[in-house]
């Protein structure tokens, strides 16, 4: 028996061999691969500088500290983003300001930026959600006109391009994550990237001055990520996560079970001690191999997404994501709008198909940001979206089965109002 998870951890071939070799050589913590990976990553991004960090969130935090913004400065974020990123801005003494998204691209609406600018605004943080590039020309034009710094959040978007440029190369700096579910899996870690030598110097100094994690902490992180990879496979998932989700579906929304596994939303000031660690040499080895495989994996995700596009475009109850012109997405996640997302997800889990709604946070609605509340109806409407499995190791037979199930389970749902969710009016 098989069940299909919405997620899959990207395990680079040879990871266990790399780990054992590094353990025997004694270069788990320090070694030349850290510098090699940073240079390779910067070259891939076509930028002069890249600095590894313990987390993507710490890369962002170090960038903010390197910019030396006055305390209380405001930073504009999309309402739809991982709560940790604006929380790190608060930890740096800054104030998040949230603006709504476009309903069909899921990204920051550039038309909302100027209405959020005040005399305290210092930066804009576009998040390339689900791997879809933001409209960087418009964002940069506004930022330049108002003398604002742009810091790109590329955690979902490694390999995505806008007008033939990699995302992460438009602003003054950018950051990404190497967590196990991301496009490059280093079993944790992050990276700050920039073309500014002063930002690079300051971020490198802060990151490199942190202590290495203990061997036990490092091995625990790797083991848990490896276990996650195995448990998300179709056969193992049928016996691991699926029964729990199915049981929850019998008494209501099964996503409640998923929420229990998410990182607890909480203040991050002061910065938790566990965050302040160095990126290790073994993680860099994983990163070098992952970077070599990145385009191959991204192409597999794009192929899966094209199959969904072709198979689901004529279903009245479903609205596909809109990819802006002159952009290429890595399809880190493939999310659709559905006229009745709750019903479709409940039906799907009974058929051993795990779909998900609201995959990241609507930050203005969180208690953590209650003093930063702003009405963002399109971000709030993301509860009507579902994530379809499109990851690189999805088998073709599973993809075909998912398509058949989604078509069958949605055929009697009411049509979605596509005009309501179109930004091209």
Image: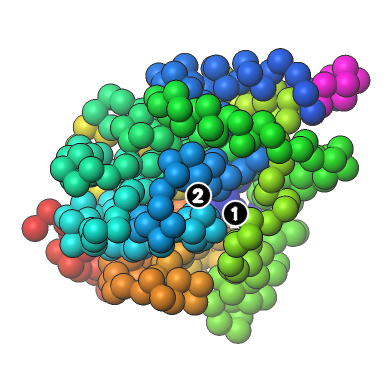
Coloring scheme of the render? rainbow
x then y, percent, for residue 192: 51, 34
The residue at 54%/58% (across/down) is 91
Is residue 321 placed above or below 213 in the rendered structure? Answer: below
What label sits on residue 5 in the rendered view? 1
Q: Which residues are magenta?
A: 21-28
| Residue visible at 41% across and 76% down in the picture | 371
Q: Could you tell me which quadrant the N terminus lies in?
A: bottom right
In the image, is 295 to the left or to the right of 288? left
Residue found 57% across the figure and 22% down from its top: 38
Residue closer to the observer: 141 or 380: 141
State the residue lying farthest toward the front.
70
Q: Quadrant of residue 15?
A: top right
Q: Quadrant of residue 172?
A: top left
Residue farthest toward the right in the current orientation of the protein? 24
Q: Residues within 10 Å of mark 1 (few under 14, many from 20)?
A: many
The residue at the point 53 percent across, 32 percent down is 202
The residue wearing badge 2 is 389
């Amino acid at each position: 028996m098989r069940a299909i998870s919405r997620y899959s951890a990207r395990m680079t071939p040879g990871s266990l061999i790399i780990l054992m070799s590094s353990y025997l050589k004694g270069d788990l913590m320090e070694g030349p691969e850290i510098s090699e990976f940073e240079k390779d990553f910067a070259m891939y991004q076509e930028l002069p500088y890249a600095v590894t960090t313990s987390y993507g969130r710490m890369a962002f935090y170090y960038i903010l500290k390197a910019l030396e913004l006055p305390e209380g400065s405001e930073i504009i974020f999309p309402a739809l983003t991982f709560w940790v990123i604006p929380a790190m801005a608060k930890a740096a003494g800054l104030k998040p300001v949230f603006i709504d998204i476009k309903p069909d691209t899921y990204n920051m609406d550039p038309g909302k930026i100027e209405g959020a600018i005040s005399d305290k605004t210092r930066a804009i943080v576009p998040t390339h959600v689900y791997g879809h590039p933001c409209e960087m020309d418009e964002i940069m034009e506004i930022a330049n006109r108002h003398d604002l710094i742009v810091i790109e959040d590329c955690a979902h978007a490694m390999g995505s391009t806008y007008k033939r440029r990699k995302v992460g190369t438009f602003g003054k700096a950018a950051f990404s994550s190497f967590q196990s579910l991301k496009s490059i899996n280093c079993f944790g870690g992050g990276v700050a990237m920039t073309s500014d030598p002063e930002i690079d110097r300051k971020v490198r100094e802060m990151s490199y001055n942190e202590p290495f994690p203990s061997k036990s902490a490092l091995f625990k992180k790797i083991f848990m990520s490896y276990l996650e990879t195995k448990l998300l496979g179709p056969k193992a998932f049928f016996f691991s996560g699926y029964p729990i989700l199915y049981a929850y579906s019998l008494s209501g929304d099964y996503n409640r079970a998923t929420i229990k596994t998410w990182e607890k939303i909480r203040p991050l000031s002061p910065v938790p001690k566990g965050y302040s660690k160095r990126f290790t040499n073994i993680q860099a080895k994983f990163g070098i191999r992952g970077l070599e495989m990145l385009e191959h994996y991204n192409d597999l995700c794009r192929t899966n997404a094209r199959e969904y596009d072709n198979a689901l475009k004529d279903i009245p109850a479903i609205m596909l994501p809109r990819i802006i012109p002159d952009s290429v997405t890595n399809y880190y996640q493939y999310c659709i709008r559905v006229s009745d997302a709750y019903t479709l997800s409940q039906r799907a889990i009974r058929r051993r198909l795990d779909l998900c709604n609201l995959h990241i946070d609507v930050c203005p609605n969180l208690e953590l940001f209650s003093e930063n509340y702003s009405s963002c109806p399109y971000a709030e409407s993301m509860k009507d979206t579902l994530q379809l499995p499109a990851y690189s190791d999805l088998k073709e037979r599973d993809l075909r089965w998912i398509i058949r199930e989604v078509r069958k389970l949605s055929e009697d749902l009411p049509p979605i109002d596509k005009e309501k969710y179109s930004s091209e009016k």
